[in-house]
Amino acid sequence: MEVKLLAYTPEPLKVIYTAARTCYSARSPAEIWADEVPEAKMADLVNRLIQQGHHSVLEHVSFTLGISGISRSCLAQLTRHRVGIAFSVQSQRYVRLDRPTYVTPPSVGVEPEILRRFERAMAEAWAAYRELSEAGIAPEDARFVLPNAATCNLVMTVNIRELIHICELRLCPRAQWEIHQLFLKVAAEVLKVAPFLASHLVPKCLRLGYCDEPESCGIMPHWRELGAEGKLPNPISRLQDNG
C-alpha cells in the first residue's frame, strides 16, 4: 500500500482562519486575508472552532492523495464515505490485470499451509481470468472471477471536515485492519502540510473522552461504565441498545 499527497489547498490554516473571521466581521475576506496573523493565533482559533462544532469553514480546504495497492475489499469500505470526498478509481473494465496483484491479510500468513491455500486460490483466479481473456471475453466480464483481494489504484480528494470524520471512525483500533492502515498513512501525509490538525485526525474516543462503540478496545473507558458511575464528561443522547 502506498499513499502520496499529490496536491492540497495552499495555506490551509490561513484559508480556514479567513473563512471563520469573515463570518463575524464587517471587513471583506480580502482585507482579512491581507492581515499578518501569527500562525499560533490562527491555529488556536481553528482548534476552538473544531471543538465548538463550527465545521463548515473546514470545507474550504481539501487534500488530493494518490493511493495504490489497496484491495477491492478496502475500496468498498472507503467509498462508503460519500460527502466531501471524491474518488477516481482504476477500472477493471478498461485495464487488463494480467499480473496477479493482491493483498494478503496478516491472519492468512500466520500458518504456512493456510497461506499456501490462499496463494493457490489467487493463482487459480488469475489463471481463469487469463483463460477468459484469451477466449475473447471482454475485461468487463473476465473480471468477475477476480477476488476481493485484487489490488487497485485511485486518486482521492477529501476536505478537512470529512477527513476528521473518517479518521474518527477508521483510526479506531476496532476498525478493519486494512482501512485502518490506509488512514494512518493518509493522516501522516496530511500532517506534513497541515500539522495544526494533529489533535483532530484521531479516533473518536480521544475527542469524546469515552468509547461509544459496542465494546471498548481499552484506550478509553466505555460510556456505559462512565454513565453508571455518573462520570460522563459530556451529556450524551443515544438510542437504547438493540439488545
Image (cartoon, rainbow, N blue to C red):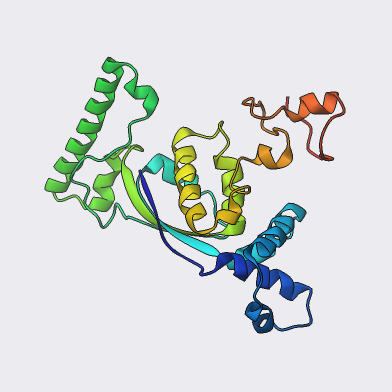
Q: Is residue 159 above or below residue 225?
A: below
Residue 154, x across and y down, in percent? 37, 55
Closest to the observer, 138 or 102 = 102
Quarter occupied by residue 151: top left
Quarter occupied by residue 121: top left
- For image coordinates 34% across by 19% down, the residue present is 110
Left or right placement of residue 221 versus residue 81 in this view: right
Q: Is residue 175 above or below residue 193?
A: above
Left or right placement of residue 230 versus residue 183 in this view: right
Left or right placement of residue 122 versus residue 42 in this view: left
Residue 123, x across and y down, in percent? 20, 32
The residue sitting at the right extreme is: 230
Q: Is residue 110 above or below residue 24?
A: above
Residue 135, x across and y down, in percent? 13, 46
Question: Which quadrant of the rendered structure holds the C terminus?
Answer: top right
Question: Which quadrant of the rendered structure holds the N terminus?
Answer: top left
- For image coordinates 21% across by 53% down, the residue present is 138
- For image coordinates 23% across by 51% down, the residue present is 139
